[in-house]
Every structure is written in C-alpha cells, then in structure tokens.
Amino acid sequence: MARFHSFSFPCLCLAFLVCFILIHASPAAIDEPTGLVDKVCNKTSNYTFCVEALYSDRRTPDADSYTLAFIAFGVAYANASSSRDYIAELLKKTSGQDYHSRLEICGHDYLRAVSKLEEACNDLNSETFFGLAKLAGVASKASDHCQDAFRGISSPPLGSRNGDLKRLCEIGAVIAKLFTGSS
C-alpha cells in the first residue's frame, strides 16, 4: 500500500494542478491553436473538445510533442481520479443494490483507468513511449465498461464523465503515435 501512495503522490499533485489550471484557463488562448495542437486535434473525433482540453494547461502554446503528451495524460489522469472519487461518494450515498453494484463496477473500472494513466505518466518520465497508446486504450476501455454497466438506465450518472475520459484517452493515443510513427 505504501508503494501506491509514493507513486501516486506526484500524479495527485499534477491532478490538482491541472484542476486549478482548468478553472483559471484563459479562453482567449484557444482562438488560434498551435500547429502541433491543430495536427493532433484534427486526428481526434472531437476537435473542439481536444483543443479545449489541451489548452486547459498554460504550457500548451509553447509545448513540443513531449510536453503535450504530459499535458494530455495529465488531464486524463486528473479526470479519471476525479471520477474515481466521485464514484466513491456516490457509493456512500446509494442504497439500491442494483445501482450500487453498477457503481462498484465503475469504481473498479476507474481504479484501472487511473492506474494505467499513472503508468503512462511514469513511462513519459522515463521516456518510454511505445506503450502509451496501449495504456490510453486500456483506460478508454475502462470508461466504456463503466458505461456498459449502466446500459438500460435512461440517465447514467457517469455518462458525461465516461465520454470525457474516452475523448481524453483518444488525445493521448494520438499524441503517443507521434513518438512511434504509427498512424
């Protein structure tokens, strides 16, 4: 257990920093994305979401691909961590067994997503790029699995969070491909 805390503390600090930056980001900086951001975001399913997510960090206008990868995986990690904590709060307040079981599935999914995104941050720190796209894919699949847990529910409680994590992981995967040369 101590090992988990020692590795997660730096990422937790990064998560709080990203959340702070998200709250205080200047929307004016998004008017004209850099060429790199434009190149990355054009390869995602939601250009606007991608630009806004990357520009939630003030380093983006001057970012090279390496820094942009840190930003993308950091934002995804912060999102997954926040959702994991939100699920924990929902579990405390939920009394219905079916709903509780579905939330437990999502809790496990988000633990996995956080773990894989933390691993991606560690890989970036050690300049190991080849596993980044796969780690982003595993985290994305965790959000899909959580969404599937609420199939049949008219208004899933984590629908937007699952969608956001999926799109953030997609951004990370696109950036990861810049390092590996895959398309």
Image (cartoon, grey):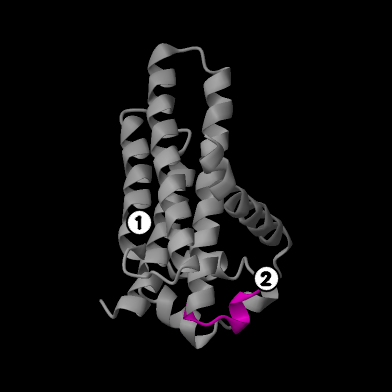
* Neighbourhood count class around disc 2 (C-alpha, 10 Å): few under 14, some 14–19, many 20 upward: few
Residue 29, visible in the rendered structure? yes
Task: Please name the amino acid that badge 2 sits on.
Answer: Pro
Q: Position of residue 176 (x, y in %)?
A: 37, 71
Q: Viewer-proximal residue, 33 or 59?
A: 59
Residue 83 in view (yes/no): no
* Farthest left residue in view: 183
User: What amino acid is at disc 1?
Assistant: Leu
Q: In this view of the protein, which residue sits in the foreground, 156 or 112?
A: 112
Say if mark 1 contacts mark 2, CB within 8 Å. Answer: no
- Image quarter where the C terminus lies is bottom left
Query: Which residue sits at x=48%, y=60%?
Result: 121
Q: Is residue 127 magenta?
A: no
The percent coordinates of residue 44 (x first, y second) are: 37, 69
Mark 1 lies on residue = 135
Helix, strand or loop for disc 1? helix
Q: Residue at x 58, y 46 (%)?
A: 6
Question: Up-down: is 28 above or below 142?
Answer: below
- Magenta-colored stretch includes residue 60: yes
Magenta residues, start to end: 59-65
Please identify the residue farthest to the right as the structure is shown. Answer: 24
Disc on res. 27? 2
Gap between marks 1 and 2 measured at Cα:
30 Å
Q: Quadrant of residue 92?
A: top right
Position of 137 with respect to 106 (left or right) is: left
Local packing at callout 1 (Cα closer than 10 Å; few below 14, some 14-19, many 20+) is: many
Label tally: 2
Q: Can you give x and y, in whole percent of width and height, for residue 93 in the image?
A: 58, 19
Residue for point 62% across, 57% down: 14
